[in-house]
């Protein structure tokens, strides 16, 4: 039961996409701001599936600006394990030519990505921000008596493996420690 309640959260990534035609669910990146540069009032934020949409734009050329939030700007994470996207892709449909831009890094998506699109009449822009490569991270709590703060490390790293190692202490040292 403990493992069921612990769960895994995603930084900038959510896995809540419905299954369509029996395909496995596609993960999406939630919380990415999408703005129409020529009309800043046209603003969307990607949902848990990474989806966004715009309606009511006149035919013409537009630039969509995608900007993700830094992890430290997100609500506090209370889990000991998270999955972080290392690369991202952006898909856009409803334009004269579909867009599929991949290989974006976290730094680039945080700094902002501009994508030019061309709309015809009656077009509805819709799209999705998706994670590419993922990595599992674990929280290493601060060591008792250490000045080192807690920190995140890759789950398969030596630091993560070492965090669970057993330290042998002889009885004499333990008694000395307990008397302090």
Image (tube, helix red, strand yellow):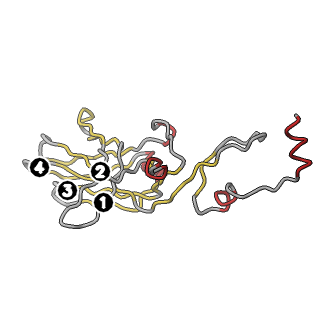
Judged from the image, the secondary structure of the residue bearing numbered disc 1 is loop
Q: Is residue 166 left or right of residue 7?
A: right
Mark 4 or mark 1: which is in front?
A: 1
Q: Residue furthest bottom?
A: 22
**Which residue occupies 20% across, 48% down?**
61
Q: Real-space Cα distance between discs 4 and 2?
A: 22 Å
Q: Who is closer to the viewer here, 46 or 22?
A: 22
Q: Residue at x 38, y 49 (%)?
A: 113
Which of the 4 image quarters holds residue 39? top left
Between marks 4 and 3, how big is the CA–CA gap? 9 Å
Using a 10 Å C-alpha cutoff, classify the residue at mark 4 as few (fewer than 14 neighbours), some (14 to 19) or many (20 or more). some
The label shown at residue 93 is: 3
Instruction: Return the residue at label 1.
Output: 26
Residue 121, given in percent of the width and then of the height, sits at 7, 49
Residue 13 showing in the rendered view: yes
Q: Residue at x 31, y 47 (%)?
A: 48
Q: Quadrant of residue 163?
A: bottom right
Residue 117 against residue 161 in the figure, above or below: above
- The residue mark sitting in front, 1 or 3, is 1
Badge 3, how many Cα within 10 Å: few under 14, some, many 20+? some
* Marker disc for residue 49: 2
Residue 144 is marked as none
* Disc 4 element: loop
Q: Are marks 2 and 3 in contact (CB under 8 Å)?
A: no
- Residue nearest the viewer, comparing 97 with 28: 28
Q: How many marks?
A: 4
- Quadrant including the C terminus: top right
């Amino acid at each position: 039961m403990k493992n069921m309640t612990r769960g895994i959260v995603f930084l900038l990534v959510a896995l809540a996409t419905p299954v369509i035609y029996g395909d496995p669910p596609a993960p999406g990146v939630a919380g990415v701001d999408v703005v129409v540069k020529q009309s800043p009032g046209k603003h969307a934020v990607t949902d848990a599936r990474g989806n966004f949409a715009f309606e009511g734009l006149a035919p013409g050329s537009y630039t969509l600006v995608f900007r993700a939030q830094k992890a430290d700007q997100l609500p506090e994470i209370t889990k000991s394990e998270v999955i972080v996207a290392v690369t991202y892709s952006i898909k856009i449909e409803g334009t004269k030519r579909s867009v599929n831009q991949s290989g974006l890094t976290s730094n680039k998506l945080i700094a902002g990505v501009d994508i030019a699109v061309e709309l015809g009449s009656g077009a509805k822009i819709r799209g999705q921000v998706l994670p590419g490569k993922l990595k599992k991270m674990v929280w290493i709590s601060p060591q008792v008596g250490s000045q080192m703060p807690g920190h995140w490390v890759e789950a398969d790293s030596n630091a993560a493996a070492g965090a669970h190692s057993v330290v042998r202490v002889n009885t004499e040292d333990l008694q000395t420690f307990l008397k302090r």
